Image (tube, rainbow, N blue to C red):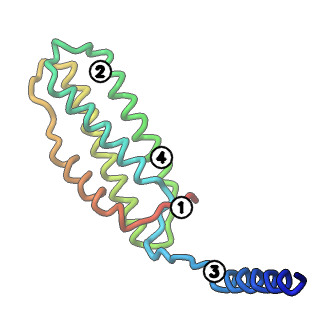
């Protein structure tokens, strides 16, 4: 009985030791450039803004509450301005990360300009709406670059 117990203990000990030595922790290295701002959240917020502005563009001006639409647009602009202020302070060591930050800043500035034009068109009798082409193009460029970076808070 003692031999069986000793054999079981040795066998279990060998398996445990063998398991410990073969289980090595491997850290997968991510060689993408680091950005210190959450571009994913900023872009998803930007896409939500674009969808709201598209909906606003499709409804005739006489059918919407201009003051409510104006307030909604001002909230969008405030979100963008907050992100712009935070990002202009950030500095990155890698030139690629700085270039990407500049691209995101450009996008936010174009969106803010679009929001200003949208507010103006709400209050005027102008049926023509501002062009979204430059905003969409910039959004596509920024979104395409996003997977090349990883976010690490500063």
Q: Are marks 4 and 3 in contact (CB under 8 Å)?
A: no
Foreground of the two, 112 or 32: 32
Q: Position of residue 32 (x, y in %)?
A: 43, 72
Q: Quadrant of the N terminus?
A: bottom right
At 53% from the left and 61% from the top, the residue drawn is 152
At 26% from the left and 16% from the top, the residue drawn is 66
Above or below for 89 versus 91 = above
Residue denoted by label 2: 69
At 15% from the left and 46% from the top, the residue drawn is 133
Residue denoted by label 3: 23
Helix, strand or loop status at disc 4: helix
Cα separation between marks 3 and 2 = 59 Å
Closer to us: mark 3 or mark 2?
3
Choose the circle earlier in sequence order: 4 or 1: 4
Residue denoted by label 4: 85
Closer to us: mark 4 or mark 1?
1
Q: Which mark is residue 12?
A: none
Helix, strand or loop status at disc 1: loop
Above or below for 135 versus 4 = above
Density class for disc 1 (Cα within 10 Å; few <14, some 14-19, many ≥20) is: few
């Amino acid at each position: 009985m003692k031999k069986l117990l000793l054999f079981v203990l040795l066998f279990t000990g060998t398996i445990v030791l063998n398991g410990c030595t073969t289980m090595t922790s491997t850290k997968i290295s991510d060689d993408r450039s680091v950005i210190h701002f959450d571009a994913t959240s900023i872009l998803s917020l930007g896409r939500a803004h674009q969808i709201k502005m598209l909906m606003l563009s499709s409804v005739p001006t006489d059918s919407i509450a201009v003051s409510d639409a104006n307030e909604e647009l001002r909230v969008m602009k405030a979100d963008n301005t907050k992100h712009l202020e935070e990002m202009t302070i950030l500095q990155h060591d890698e030139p690629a990360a700085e270039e990407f930050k500049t691209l995101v800043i450009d996008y936010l500035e174009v969106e803010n300009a679009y929001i200003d034009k949208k507010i103006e068109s709400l209050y005027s009798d102008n049926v023509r709406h501002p062009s979204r082409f430059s905003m969409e193009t910039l959004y596509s460029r920024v979104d395409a670059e996003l997977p090349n970076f990883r976010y690490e808070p500063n």
